[in-house]
Image (cartoon, helix red, strand yellow):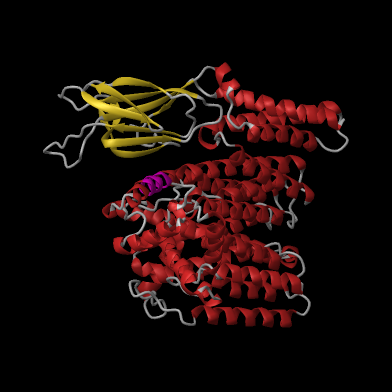
Amino acid sequence: MWLQWALGACVAGVALVLILVALVPSRIVIPVGRPGGLVPPMLIGVHGAEKNYDHWMRWTTGHARVRWPGRFGAVPEAIVVTVAGFPGRAADQVEIRINGVPSRHQVTARYEDLRIPVPHGVRAPLDVTITSPVTRPPADPRTLGVRLEAVTIENRDLASRVADIDTPGGVLVLGALAWLIGVWAAGHGAPAYRRIACGAAAWALVVLAMAVVSATALRPSAWLTLGPVAVGGLATWLLARAGQARVAAALSGLALTLLGLTIVTWCVASFVDVPRWDIWDFVVFLGRREQRGLTLADFWAPHNEHRPSVIRAVLLANVLLSGWNHWNELWTMLVITAVHALLLVKSVGDSRQRSGVATLIFVAGAGTLVATATQWENWLQGWQIALVNGAACMSAALILLAGRAITWPRLTAAAALVFLGTAGFASCLAGWPIGLVAILVRRPRQWPAKAAAWLAVGVLVSLAYVHGMVRPPELPAPAPIFSSLEALWSVTYGTLLALGLPIWYEPHAFLRETFGVWLMPAVGAGGILLGVVVLFGHWRDVESRREQAWLLPALLMAFSGAACTITAIGRVPMGLHAMTASRYIVFTVLFWIGLLMLLTVRTPYRSRAARGAGLVVASLIVAGGLRAWGDALPFMEQHYVGGILGREALLRADWPNTGALFPVAPVLDERRQWLERHHLSLYRPARR
């Protein structure tokens, strides 16, 4: 029997590959001239989108570049560039390069399509550069090249694409796994026809989902596909092992797979292999290692208001193993995030709820929030491993303290996790009092001794953390919330603002003075109010209060609020806009994950109407989190563009154009020379 199901899985995998290849259009049009038309390609060297004689277009600066990261099943045959020269002038000589292979064309003032065959053997990603003469009109401060409307990728015919499929392994596994999970979801002992029907239904659902996201979230890379598929498969197994309905477990695994494919693809498309900002200070750390060796004090040394020991250890390992390949920092963050998501999925098993819909909504919401694109600053800068690791460690510690009986080994593991989080980002210091509250609420066996031990370790770590800490002189003093009502109000506003960002992401609201200035804190305040109402429902229900199903979500929400408050005290004096930094979202999402738990898998309400209302509200939260992903994509693109231009400027020592990497040119030059002498980072032999 298993041989038949294995054969069906092979057929399902091959069929999925063939269908996705067949769904690739013969012409993929990238409307670079339209606002928002750059998903997922990246564009460099252009001005803003504008309308010109019924054509949406962008003026180039004389040297524009479109980067198309590719799509599974697409085999480019030619590139068509829709372009027009400067009005009222004779034809311009334009050079177009495809992955470095040049071709020259005459471009008139009328829009025309320039078709350039893709050189043999050239595969995605494609870099299309357009170099042209420039004009500086007297009434326009811009430098204008040519008018760029669209770039179109013409693919080969279906037979050629099938014969030349690039790395289909990940999609094969996805199709086969979908079939097998569908067969498994039919239930033990189900008749063969039912298993076949369930396997076909699961496979068809995956086909539909992949057809929707393949243009944005499916690249010709087996590993980028297999990673999210593995996470989805593990989530399915964890939920089924915990007693969840097989169909709900399978759908939850599919949701995590789709979210994983999307964020991995977006991050890989936006990542630039170059050091940025804080990570340049690690060069000093490496220099100290070369001069006299390293001690524990070097790892524990402060950086701004933090002691990023964990990130220093991770980066040192990266230097020793790979010559400081910055891609490894992205892979590390993605792996930590995957483990974080699986830990939250595992926590569903400790819930008394067995509603398949509630489980699916929570898992989809947890994946949406943990892997949110709104924390793009963390994804795209290696130094931010400290924050991603801190959030994951805090979730794991609170799950240990709120789960099974708090034994001494579990208490030790939880304390170690809080310490690892603290040894990266100062906001994780809030984990010590939050953990103490968990011990006091649960009152495990020998709870006075355990509470005293936890408190003693927390006090020692906190004292060691603040001892010798000197606030950088360029930073303003913390907000005096105990002596100024205005400062207290500003910190409260900043905290609510940060809490609202994962659901309504509008970081430029202060610059543009939009209604988002009030909507984001209103969303945060609404979330707090809703959480209080649901927790009150737990408190009123004696059985629910005794089971303490509310404890884990309450701890997550409390830690998130405390971490935001600590951050606001230090950042609000720099301006309220400082709280819109995307890096802090990695902590604020924990608040919404806790709230989703209360509304879905750990709800106190027994009536169907109340449970249904909770699921509706939870669905709206998940929808808001997904919508925020799209709001973050332009910032990821902008970060990529700045990184590419900064990297090129750094390699040619063009200091006025390296501000996106580090603001002080002399310091940057000194550290760049050190990296070049030691063949590290972008100067490692394998990279250049």
Is 319 drawn above or below residue 83 in the view shown? Answer: below
Q: Quadrant of residue 409?
A: bottom right
Given residues 248 and 275, the one toward you in this image is: 275
- What is the x, y in percent for residue 643? 38, 49
Left or right side of 230 for 286: left
Q: Residue at x 45, y 65 (%)?
A: 282
Q: Residue at x 64, y 49 (%)?
A: 362
- List the single residue furthest toward the left: 138
Q: Which residues are magenta?
A: 635-644
Q: Does residue 286 appear left or right of residue 310 in this picture?
A: left
Q: Where 353 sits versus 30, above or below? A: below
Residue 207 is left or right of residue 523, and the answer is right
For this rendering, which residue is in front, 683 or 4? 683
Q: Is residue 339 visible to us here?
A: yes
Instruction: Tell me, yes or no, if residue 195 can be seen here.
Output: no
Query: In the displayed structure, would residue 172 be above or below residue 556?
Result: above
| Magenta stretch secondary structure, dominant | helix
Q: Position of residue 145 (x, y in %)?
A: 23, 33
